[in-house]
Image (cartoon, rainbow, N blue to C red):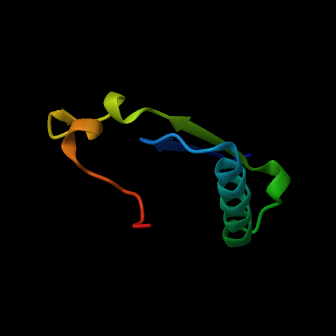
Amino acid sequence: MPLMNVVNASESDRERKREFIARLTQTYADVMQMRPDTIRVVIDEHSRDSWGVGGVTLEGSGQDESLPS
């Protein structure tokens, strides 16, 4: 049984996580030719002030992964 652990530096809303888990599971199942009910996904979310890049937090770095609105 595969386990995918996704580490994310931004928190997401519940509906977005549900969609992500469903789509990631289905993609993995399709590519690896496995039953989706055997695939596990864990999302580890961390606030941007708990994640560092180049010696500074993401919060203080000015980096933004979001798509423009």
| Left or right of residue 8: residue 32 | right
Q: Quadrant of the C terminus?
A: bottom left
Q: Residue furthest top?
A: 50
Q: Which residue is pictured at 62% across the width and 44% down the height?
A: 13
Whole-percent x, y for residue 46 in the image = 45, 32
Residue at (72% x, 50% y) in the render: 18
Outermost residue toward the left?
A: 55
Give percent across and percent down for residue 34.
78, 62
Q: Which residue is drawn at 69% across and 63% down?
A: 23
Q: In which quarter of the image is residue 3?
A: top right
Query: Is residue 20 shown left or right of residue 37?
Result: left
Q: In which quarter of the image is residue 58?
A: top left
Give coordinates of residue 26: x percent, y percent. Answer: 74, 64
Nearer to us in this view, 30 or 59:
59
- Which of the pair 69/29 is nearer the observer? 69
Q: Residue at x 32, y 53 (%)?
A: 64
Task: Work out whether residue 31 or residue 15 is closer to the camera in this orientation and state it.
Answer: 15
Q: How many marks?
A: 0
Left or right of 3? Residue 33 is right
Please tell me whether residue 67 is drawn above or below residue 17 in the rendered image. Answer: below
Q: Position of residue 50 (x, y in %)?
A: 35, 28
Front residue of 32 and 62:
62
Vertically, is 46 above or below 22?
above
Residue at the front extreme, as displayed = 69
